[in-house]
Image: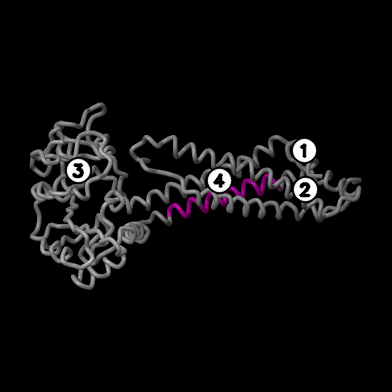
């Protein structure tokens, strides 16, 4: 009976391909939009994960993310260092600035100042140049995506001179980091240079980066720092989560992507449901003939279930494959740098497709079960 059901389904190629298109389009839209959504909100945590050495971040109590910061007084560094259980602590400055290129273009950029002595906070992966070049006068390192945005195509960034907040800056190297949510061009320099590049108020230090001593967890040390100093101390994972939560709570991204995913499901149900209903209606006499020769309703249900399962599996496969090709087809694009597809998304898409197939199959099955064997003789 299953073979007969599949032959009935594939016999009308137009409706068969219409069913496949409906499921595949829905799976593509849901998978692709969920993947972009997850990667976008995770960019709120990239400012933290781009600094892997520190497992405790200390900040003013009102600071929300790496981009929403209230500076600390310089005395905060010594307070953190004095807390028992802190292995080391170094300052970090994160601020915005304006840069004018040799071509006269003006661009808003981010400045990250790392500890002068240890260079803790500097990215691990250097694409060109050496860490020692940071000690040269007016030296900055630029991120790879920022270099592609800021400089003309084909330009070697090494040695390029810029005007950074009315001060001379020279690019000495390129680092590989994942873009943050703001997707700004990012310059890394020593903390003392950053203070000169970004003049400001009395308090200049954005964060104190610290590491828990051996034998202590970051949670324990962050609690000790908060109790001893009154500052907000967060573990790396907690602060990364704060960045994600900030985007979810303060932007329309979740609502917009949620609407798109819902529309993908609705369109899929509409296309598959309508096409499946037309297929059943056109084959109602065949189902009536089967019932006339003794095929029970349970076997009819199995036949329709086999048809729905075949359409669902093939359509789901094509849809997810197209989404994967879309994401990885743009992996070299600066806008999609670092994008990946979590395994949970195809699983969720499969669940949605199953619900869609069950719903449309049940609606189509109702008319089949009501069919009388006598229909074949009319």
Instruction: Check the image and report above or below for 273 versus 85.
Output: above
* Mark sitting earlier along the chain (4/2): 4
- The residue under label 4 is 27
Dot 2 falls on a residue whose secondary structure is: helix
Q: In this view, does 297 lie to the left or right of 46?
A: right
* Mark sitting earlier along the chain (1/3): 1
Q: Is residue 135 left or right of residue 280?
A: left
CB contact under 8 Å: marks 2 and 3: no
Cα–Cα gap, marks 1 and 3 = 63 Å
Dot 1 falls on a residue whose secondary structure is: helix
Disc number at residue 303?
2
Q: Where is residue 269 in the image (x, y as percent from the top left)?
A: 61, 50
Cα–Cα gap, marks 2 and 3 = 63 Å
Disc number at residue 7?
1
Dot 4 falls on a residue whose secondary structure is: helix
**Which of the two discs, 4 and 3, sits closer to the camera?**
3
- The residue under label 3 is 187
Q: Is residue 5 visible?
A: yes
Q: Is residue 250 visible?
A: no
Local crowd size for mark 3, using a 10 Å CA cut-off: few (<14), some (14–19), many (≥20): many
Dot 3 falls on a residue whose secondary structure is: strand
Q: Position of residue 353 (x, y in %)?
A: 60, 50
Q: Image point 43% across, 57% down: which residue?
A: 255
Q: In this view, does 351 lie to the left or right of 60?
A: right
Highlighted magenta segment, given as a residue range: 256-276
Farthest bottom residue?
227
Magenta run includes residue 238: no
CB contact under 8 Å: marks 1 and 2: no
Q: Where is residue 175 in the image (x, y as percent from the top left)?
A: 25, 39
- Quadrant where the N terminus sits is top right
């Amino acid at each position: 009976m299953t073979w007969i059901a599949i032959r009935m389904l594939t016999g009308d190629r137009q409706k068969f391909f219409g069913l496949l298109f409906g499921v595949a389009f829905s799976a593509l839209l849901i998978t692709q939009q969920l993947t972009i959504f997850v990667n976008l909100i995770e960019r709120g945590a990239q400012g933290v994960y781009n600094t892997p050495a520190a497992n405790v971040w200390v900040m003013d109590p009102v600071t929300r993310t790496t981009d929403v910061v209230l500076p600390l007084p310089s005395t905060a560094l010594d307070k953190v260092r004095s807390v028992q259980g802190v292995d080391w602590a170094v300052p970090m400055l994160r601020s915005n600035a304006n840069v004018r290129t040799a071509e006269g273009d003006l661009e808003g950029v981010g400045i990250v100042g790392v500890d002068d002595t240890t260079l803790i906070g500097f990215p691990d992966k250097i694409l060109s140049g050496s860490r020692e070049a940071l000690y040269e006068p007016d030296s900055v390192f630029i991120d790879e995506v920022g270099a592609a945005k800021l400089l003309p195509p084909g330009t070697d960034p090494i040695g390029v001179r810029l005007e950074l907040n009315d001060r001379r800056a020279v690019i000495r190297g390129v680092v590989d980091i994942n873009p943050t949510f703001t997707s700004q061009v990012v310059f890394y320099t020593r903390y003392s240079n950053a203070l000169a590049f970004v003049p400001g108020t009395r308090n200049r230090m954005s964060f104190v980066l610290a590491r828990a001593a051996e034998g202590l967890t970051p949670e324990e040390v962050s609690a000790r720092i908060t109790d001893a100093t009154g500052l907000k101390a967060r573990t790396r994972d907690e602060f990364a989560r704060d960045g994600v939560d900030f985007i979810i709570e303060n932007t329309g991204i979740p609502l917009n992507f949620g609407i798109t995913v819902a529309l993908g499901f609705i369109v899929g149900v509409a296309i598959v449901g309508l096409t499946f209903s037309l297929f059943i209606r056109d084959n109602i006499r065949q189902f009536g003939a089967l019932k006339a020769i003794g095929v029970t309703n349970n076997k009819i249900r199995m036949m329709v279930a086999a048809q729905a399962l075949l359409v669902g599996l093939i359509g789901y496969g094509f849809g997810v494959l197209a989404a994967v090709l879309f994401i990885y087809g743009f992996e070299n694009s600066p806008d999609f740098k670092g994008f990946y597809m979590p395994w949970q998304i195809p699983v969720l898409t499969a669940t949605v497709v199953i619900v869609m197939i069950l719903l449309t199959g049940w609606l189509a099955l109702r008319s089949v079960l009501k069919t009388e064997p006598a229909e074949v003789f009319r």
